[in-house]
Structures are given as C-alpha cells and as structure tokens.
Amino acid sequence: MDQFLQAIQNSITTGSLYALIALGYTMVYGILKFINFSHSDVVVIGALFSTVLALTLLEKLGLQQAPWWLGGVVLAGAMALCATVSFLVERLAYRPLRQAPRLNCLITAIGVSLFLQNTGNQKFLFGTQPRKIPALVPDAEPLFMIGKVPFRLIDFIIVGTAVVLMVALDRLVFKSAMGRAMRAVSFDHKTASLMGINVDRVISMTFVLGACLAAAGGFLYALRYQTVTQPADTTWALLGLKAFVSAVVGGIGNIRGAVLGALIIASIENFGAAYLFSGLTDAYVFAVLIGMLLLRPGGILGSAAVEKV
Amino acid sequence: MTVRRTVLSLMSRVSLAVAVSAVVVGAGGCEKKDPKGGGAGGASEVRVGHYASMTGPEATFGRSTDEGIRLAIKEINDAGGVKVGETTRRVTLVTDDTESQSTKAGDVVRKLIDVNKVHAVLGEVASSISLEGAPVCQEAGIPMITPSSTNTRVTERGDYIFRVCFIDPFQGFAGAKFAVDELKVKKVALLVDTASAYSQQLADEFAKAFVGMGGEVVSRVEYQKGEKEFNARLTKIREASPEAIYLPGYYTDIANIAIQARQLGIRVPIIGGDGWDSEELAKNAGDAIENCFYTNHYAPDDPSPEIQEFVRAYRAAYNGKTPDGLAALGYDAARVLIAALERAGTTDGSALRDAIAATKDFPGVTGRITLDRNRNAVKPIVVLERKGGAWIFRAKIEDPSAGR
C-alpha cells in the first residue's frame, strides 16, 4: 500500500515537471508544425540560472537562511532570462526560415540546441561542474506522513506552481485576445494574417510563453533534486525527450493533452520502477511512445474535434 | 533581390557564428595544452599523458588524480629528473579532459598519443571510460597505467594495460565480509547503476560473496547514472526491509540517493565502493550519509609513516587539502611508471611495458605494489565510516589470494 501511494505521489510530482516542459513543445508544434529541439536547453538554462541566482542573492544579501520571497524572485529571474533566450532564438534562427521547408527548421533546431549546450558549458557561463541549489524552502522534515509515505512541502510547491501556471496558460489561450490570435495562427497562417493578426508577434509570444513554463520547470527540478549538472549533460536531453514523448502521447499540438500525457509518462516511469524491472524505466516510456504511434498516431486527445493551439 | 539579401545575411550570420565558436574552441584548446608538451623537443624529456574527468559529475576523480600525478612528477623533476639510460630527462605531463563521458575517451587518448606524442598514458578513474581508452593505447603500443579503475575487464584489453589498484572481485568480497563480520547483517538490498561497468561487476561480486557467507540478497534495484528520481526504487527497497543497502556507484548519484533514502525513512547502513571517494559526496549529501561505509584504497588518517609523509607533502602543495584515495593512487601510478622508466632505460613502448610488468614490491602510499601476471595489483582494502560528520578509518581487509 505504501509503495502504491508513494508511486502515485511521485507520478504527480514528476508529472507536473514533465507537463511544464511538454507544454513548450506542444505549443510551438501547434503553431509552427515543427519540433523545437532546443526547448530542453531552455529548461537547463532555467535550472542553472536559478541555482546561480539563488547562490548570488544569498551571498550578496549576506543571508544564511533564504527568506520566503527569494524563491519567487529567483523564479521570475529565470523566467525573464529564458524568455529572452527563447525570443532571440526564434527571432535569429527560426524566423528567417519561415518560408523554408520544415526539415530545415528541424535541423536548425538541432543546431541551436548544440550551440546552447556548448556555449552554456563554457567557463564564463555555467561551466561543467555540477552545482547545488541552496534550500529555498524549509525541507528538513516532511509536512505529514500517510503510512510510511512522507509528504514534503517541496512536492506541494511543485504541483501548486505547475497547476497555477497551467491554469493561467489555459485561460490565456482560450479566453484572451492573444489566445484567440494564437489559435487562429495555428489554424492557418495566411488567413490569420489577412484578418489583421501580426503572425510574427504571435509566434514570438508562443516561444516566450513556452520558455517561461520551461524556466519554471527547470527551477522546480533544481529545487527538488538539488544538484544541477552541466548544460551538455545527457540527463537533460533525456528529460527533454520524456517531455516531448508526453506531448506526443497526449496529442501533439494540444495543450491539455500535453498535461495528460505528462502524467501518464510519469506514472509509467514510477510504477515501472516500483513494480516491474527497475533498470528499464526509460524503455517503458519509449515502448509506450511506439505503441501510441502505431495505434493512435494523433495521441490521446489529438483528434480533430479538439481545438488545437 | 530580397532572396539574395536573405541568403547573404544568413551567410554572414553563419560565418559570425563559426568565427565565434572558433575563438571559443581555440581559447579552450590553448588552455589545456601544456606549453612544453607536443612538437619538437623530443629526446630531452619524457612525456606522460593523463586522460581524466576534469569536469562533469565525476570531476573530483580527475582533479584529485591529476594533483597526485603532478606531485609525483614535481618531486622527480625537483630531484633533477628521471634517469633513462645514459641521459637524465625531465618529465612533462599533458592532461586532457574526458568530461566524465566514456564516449570522449577514445578521441582524447588518440590525441595524447598522435598529437602530444606521449611515451606513456595514465588514466582513467571510471572503468567504463578506461575501457574505451585502453584499446587505443594497446593498438598504438603505448603502455597505459590506470591508477584506479577496478573493473577486471580493463586490463584484459591487452598486455600494454596495467593498474596499480585492486580489482572488483576483491572489493566486492571485502564489502560483503565487512557487512557480515562487522555490521552483522544478514539481509541486504542492492542498488546498481546499469550504465556503469564498475557498478555492475562490483554488485555481482558483492552478492556472490555475501550469499557465500550465508547472507541473503532481498532486493536488487537498478538505475542509470544521472537519474535524479529514486523514490519509487527506494520504496521498493524499503518494502523488502533489508538490514543494509549495498550501493556501488559514483558520488554525484550517491548523494541524491542517500538524501532521498533518508527522506523516505530508510535508516539502515549504506555500503559503497571507492566510487564514493570524493569530498563532494559529503558536501552534497550532508547528514544523509551518516551511518554509511565504503571500501577504499587508503585512509588519510592511517598513522603509517609513508601515508603521513604523503599527506603532508600533498597538503603543502595544494593549500592544505587532504588527499583522497584517488590522489594517492595517481601519485603511486606516476611513481610506478617513473621507476619502470629507469629500469627500462628507454622510452620505447615494448621495453617500457616489460619494465612495468616486472614491478615488484614497489613501496606505494596505498600499499606495496606487485603486479600479477594479469597486470593487476594485489593490495589490502580499508573501510571508512561516516561518523559525526567525518570519514574515519574503520577496518582493514587483506586479499585472501595475496601471495598466491
């Protein structure tokens, strides 16, 4: 029973992290119909920059213990940086290729990803040493226990932040003028632009939104796992890949699908590790991807009935 | 026209990016290069290559080893150099970074041999990385001594490959013996890194020895280096209620695992191998590694005069830093190599290989080093215990096959 409850708790927490990252993949795919492979590198920038920022702020303020608001400041800082990077990537690398075949964009995305990784690895940026983020929330003891399963404050913060951000995104996309413009562009670039929508601005906005969620994902990831490795570490590529698989399983291009897919992928991983052979958790994830692509290539919510973004 | 302008602007951007990355790469490259290494200058010096994880999740392994090697080389150069045949030559070291990735090892070692023209190679620490570097040395006929790769397959790569440390069948045995004799446990769980040749062999050997001593392995759970989420796996282990956990892995992962295990209320002792040997472990894991033990090559608080002399020299050279086992092994590996160079009287690869193979009763910091016919060293193991925020010497275990 403890094992089952623990697996559920883990699935929700890791699922929230995957969802934050998966949303960036799915939004860009919805609008531009290409997979932004450099998205996982934005997550890395979010994780590493929040670590550096938290360390610097604590040192500059001369504090031993982080005040409660510091986490918010760090998150805002990470979001600002990731949004800027993502905006520039779109402006400099993808926009010139707007009329080019989609394969060109895909290959450019891989190039951007390698560029971000290797630049981030340089000494004058993040370097290659693993870093440890200071404790921004009190985390010595769990809040409460159910059976033997500890419930920790950090888990609630992760899930809470993810839910707030995702609800905000959902409102933005389905209730605001900008959201309507995004949905219009996703349907048809040309028609949308004839209707007076500034397509380039909408696309920039999509990248910025995706990057903000990725920054939050990176920040929460760092808080939960504490040690943050170098930008070119394969761990990050795998994290990005799992988020991408979540987006595909949920139905790529579909916002709610990405969240659903993330929860499914996280459950497969955690229940696989708990009840099946634990060395193969990654294999389970990709087996599900293959099965999904064979049986229902559009993903769970990927049918035409659901409005795409 | 607009098309042409776009192409032009695109091209200028690409060339700018290329230029920028060329400058960045160039700057990085210059830094690593030893000013005296490579190129001409041939007969007057002996060039030793060291491939090591200077960065990445195993970075302290590479840096400690490199510091140990540099200390040994500095001592020999301060004494005038190494006497090779009729001439006395200075030793220069060229260190290159594998970034803790086995896929980089082949290229790095090839560069050391082809570009820097080294006469012998030292490295790596992680067995998976040594396994990739060794075939390159073997093929080129350049002797390689790994200071601290303990997986048996490393020296099986060929007759040019040596090591100055014990091997994992013995390390696994020592871990099991310690668990049974000292900790009096009967049931253990294994947590194994499937991405690491080291972790897998060590776990297998431990399990074999432990079961042979009447113990029981109640659970074997696997992970992959770099994973961060261990709650599900650790819960599985907790359900099997072991009396101890055997966790042969590398320190960056160990810190995460120990923290999450303690958070889940797992208080039993955790036992590991020499892959734990890094100051980063305690820094990252904090209190979580109290009541933990690991098998290692030496203990810096061992009162024997050879060890205390080395600790003193190392502290003097590196701002009071206490040498870990990897630094001691790096120091020993370099000194074994230098002694072999003097005996060989030449830097020729095959003669040097024969001289290294003949190493017998060499007085190393980590014990007397005699290489057996499989080019492995046979040495005792020490067990360190984490108590009150410090690693302290707990037990010494002799190899039952010694002297055979």
Image (spheres, rainbow, N blue to C red):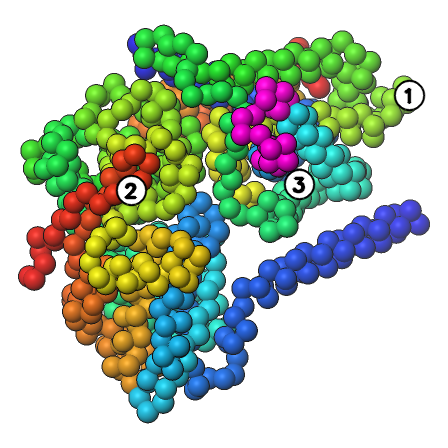
On screen, residue B403 above or below B254: below
- Res. B193 image quadrant: top left
Residue at left 43%, top 31%? B228
Nearest to the eye among marks 3 and 2: give it. 2
State which chain disc 1 sits on.
Answer: A
| Category of crowding for the residue at label 1, using alpha-carbon neighbours closer than 10 angstroms: few (below 14), some (14–19), many (at least 20) | few
Nearest to the eye among marks 2 and 1: give it. 2
Q: x, y percentage for residue B28?
A: 60, 60
Q: CA distance from mark 2 to mark 1?
A: 69 Å
- Mark 3 lies on a secondary structure that is helix
Q: Nearer the viewer, residue A54 or B334?
A: A54
- Asked if badges 3 and 1 are on one and the same chain, I answer yes
Quickly name the residue at label 3.
A109
| Category of crowding for the residue at label 3, using alpha-carbon neighbours closer than 10 angstroms: few (below 14), some (14–19), many (at least 20) | many
Q: Is residue A77 visible?
A: yes
Q: x, y percentage for residue B247?
A: 28, 36
Residue A70 counted in the magenta span: yes
Quickly name the residue at label 2.
B391
| Category of crowding for the residue at label 2, using alpha-carbon neighbours closer than 10 angstroms: few (below 14), some (14–19), many (at least 20) | many
Q: x, y percentage for residue A164?
A: 63, 13
- Res. B221 image quadrant: top left
What's the amino acid at mark 2? Trp
On screen, residue A282 above or below B360: above
- Asked if badges 3 and 2 are on one and the same chain, I answer no
- B144 on left or right of B17: left
What's the amino acid at mark 1? Gly
Q: x, y percentage for residue A4?
A: 34, 13
- Mark 1 lies on a secondary structure that is loop
Quickly name the residue at label 1.
A196
Q: Nearer the viewer, residue B7 or B14?
A: B14
Q: Which residues are magenta?
A: A55-72
Q: CA distance from mark 3 to mark 1?
A: 29 Å
